Image: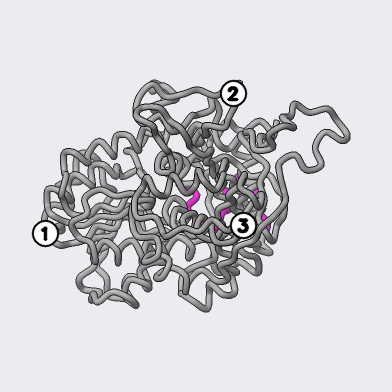
Amino acid sequence: MVMIGFGSIGQGVLPLILRHIDMKPSQITVVAAEDRGGAPELARFGVAFVRKRLTPDNLRQVLDKRIGKGDLVVNLSVEVASMALVELCQEKGALYIDTCIEPWPGGYSDPSLPVSHRSNYALREHMLALRDKFKGGTTAVIAHGANPGLVSHFTKQALMNIARDTGHATARPTTRQGWAELARDLGVKVIHVAERDTQVSRKPKEIGEFVNTWSIDGFVAEGGQPSEMGWGTHEKALPRDGARHDFGCGAAIYLNRPGLHTRVRTWTPKEGPFHGFIITHNESISMADYFTVRNGRRVAYRPTVNYAYHPCDQAIMSMHEIMGKNLVQQKRQRLMVDEIESGIDELGVLLMGHKKGAYWYGSQLSIEEARKLAPYNNATSLQVCAPVLSGIVWALENPQAGLVEADEIDFERNLEICLPYLGPVVGRYSDWTPLDGRGELFPEDLDNEDPWQFRNFRVA
């Protein structure tokens, strides 16, 4: 195994790999530009460490002799192009998994690129174009962490639960078309990946410091990309700053503004209603695409899908600071793990528009339980590490699946592996809609006929 990157997720998942997979530490090599404080753990485990920043010029030189047929590359890096690693793994006959589709440096922020081409939609389209080139090749599990990844499995389980609870008798679908038709028949109009992180440290955020519970570089990079969402067939009009892509599957739109500047109303069981940021993520596009029903070339059904994320409060303060400086990142970073005193990461999917209104299904993992379950983790990182582990296991069990996304692999097998590490996993119905309490003190531009229109969710 070659692990690319050794930040919070690399450090958190390594003990799980050694716990669950029959692999000796001597069989693992970590390649990273820096260890981010993880060098003592690597030495304690006896895992080889290569301190090297991978670039387009040296990637093959560094990895060529370290990757062979039947080996596994676990890409947990930032600014190392996923496509380049997938192509190398396919040529070598090695398995591959990552948690998101990463470009080389500048891919998120190159002002010479049109907004559409700085999107996750574009990254996904370029990645999926490799399918034909490497058809029948070794397994490459694309974008399989918490989200994207785990939330796709949550969504399928949520659909089965809603079908059961609404008397919609159905067998578990076995095809993409079957899942899309089930979502349509249940009346699901909108899917939010609704997440509220309440983990807190007694140490306050300082000026000029970005504090978060997971990869700060990753968060800032995706927050500076255009806000994106899968675009449903029930929507009546594009947002005023929205645009469609002129290439690819057509399942998503983007806004001409960054995700760190874009909020929507959403809901989770413990938090209740709150405002979340529409940070672009691969699952917003892949899930909308996966649950599309087509009649020939015509799209007959598709849900609107977006991430609605409220990070920990100290990250919110960090975001306010960075937004006031035109998205120029602070020089100092602090990743909260051991210093966290309390809180949970409530991460799940909120399916709306069906007979019972809204249904949230997901994990309510606390910092206390995360620490009991696995070392070097907080609640947020463990929700990522568990599906990284399950994706590795699935790839080992299905080594010739070619390029696959989370939506396309066995959700039950992955949940079986993940659930022991997710704390309470619950499903809750709610009569909440984004119209609740609206227009009482001030006039608002609302669509009262259909509460599930995007214009009702968006925070002006």
Q: How far apart are marks 1 and 2 (CA)?
A: 50 Å
Position of residue 29 measured from the top left corner of the image (x, y, whole percent) = 24, 64
Residue at position x 58%, y 30% in the image: 235
The residue lying toward the viewer, choosing from 379 and 349, is 349
Label 3 element class:
strand
Label 1 element class:
loop
Q: Mark 2 points at which residue?
A: 237
Q: Mark 1 near mark 3, Cβ–Cβ under 8 Å?
A: no
Q: Name the residue under label 3.
A: 197
Disc with the residue nearer the chain's start (1 vs 3): 1
Disc with the residue nearer the chain's start (1 vs 2): 1
Q: How many labels does the image show?
A: 3
Q: How far apart are marks 2 and 3 (CA)?
A: 32 Å
Q: Which amino acid does label 2 sit on?
A: Ala
Q: Is residue 294 left or right of residue 57?
A: right
Quadrant of residue 74 within the rendered picture: bottom left
Residue 205: in sight, yes or no?
no
Q: In this view, does 141 lie to the left or right of 367?
A: left
Q: Which amino acid does label 1 sit on?
A: Lys
Local crowd size for mark 2, using a 10 Å CA cut-off: few (<14), some (14–19), many (≥20): few
Position of residue 357 measured from the top left corner of the image (x, y, whole percent) = 66, 49
Quadrant of residue 409 within the rendered picture: bottom left
Query: In what quadrant of the picture does the C terminus appear?
Result: top right
Local crowd size for mark 1, using a 10 Å CA cut-off: few (<14), some (14–19), many (≥20): few
Residues rendered magenta in the picture = 204-217
Position of 266 relative to 380 (above/below): above
Q: Name the residue under label 1.
A: 69
